[in-house]
Amino acid sequence: LGNWLAGVGGFLVANEPDQARAERLRANLLRAGIVDCLVTCADGRKLGDVAPESFDAVLVDAPCSCEGNVRKDPSSLLRGSGTGESAVALQMPLVEKQWELIQSGWKALRSGGHIVYSTCTFNHWENEA
């Protein structure tokens, strides 16, 4: 994405709310030769209000229950499992945060832009609710 943006005169803005991860992200971008970029360290739920209708494309790589990490951590599949009210109660704080992130992404998106929502989980509470 960064290389494509550089080829069309674009600029990459990446946000990672965790400072240590933001520093690693910036180092990885530079190592990949992507210099036309800015890495911010903010709450993504606020970015749409800070920079409304500012981006042609937005990728929301939302925090999730990480069921997709089952190969690395087999117990990850159990965290989001279950049915009924207990499963919903466990997932709701995470789902609410995901919803707030995607709403912020929509606000930050210019008219005619594209948004991509991504998680590494399988459960429908996080991907289809």
Image (tube, rainbow, N blue to C red):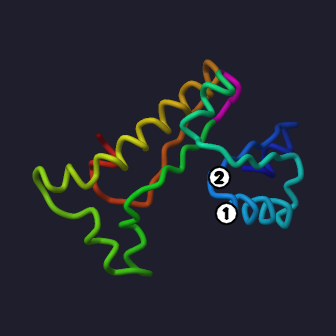
For this view, does 122 lie left or right of residue 116? left
Q: Residue at x 36, y 66 (%)?
A: 67
What residue sits 34% from the left and 47% below the top? 93
Q: Say few, some or many: other residues with alpha carbon within 10 Å of mark 2 (under 14 / 14 to 19 / 20 or more).
A: some
Q: Mark on residue 44? A: none
In the displayed structure, does residue 89 sit left or right of residue 21? left
Please, what is the dominant secondary structure of the magenta stretch? strand
Say which quarter of the image contains residue 122.
Answer: bottom left
Residue type highlighted by circle 2: Glu
11 vs 106: above or below = below
Q: Quadrant of the C terminus?
A: top left
Per the image, label 2 sits on a secondary structure element best described as: loop
Can you identify the residue that label 1 sits on?
21
- Residue 2 in the image: x percent, y percent? 77, 50
Residues 12 and 101: in front is 101
Q: Badge 1, how many Cα within 10 Å: few under 14, some, many 20+?
A: few
Q: Residue at x 79, y 59 (%)?
A: 26
Q: Would you place residue 126 above or below residue 33 in this image?
A: above
Q: Is residue 52 magenta?
A: no
> Counting residues from the N terminus, which is met first, the one under dot 2 or under dot 1?
2
9 relative to 95 in the view: left or right: right
Query: Measured from the top left, where is residue 38 in percent x and y?
Result: 81, 46
* Residue ID for mark 2: 16
Quarter of the image where one finds residue 19: bottom right
Q: Which residues are magenta?
A: 53-57
Contact (CB < 8 A) between labels 2 and 1? Answer: yes
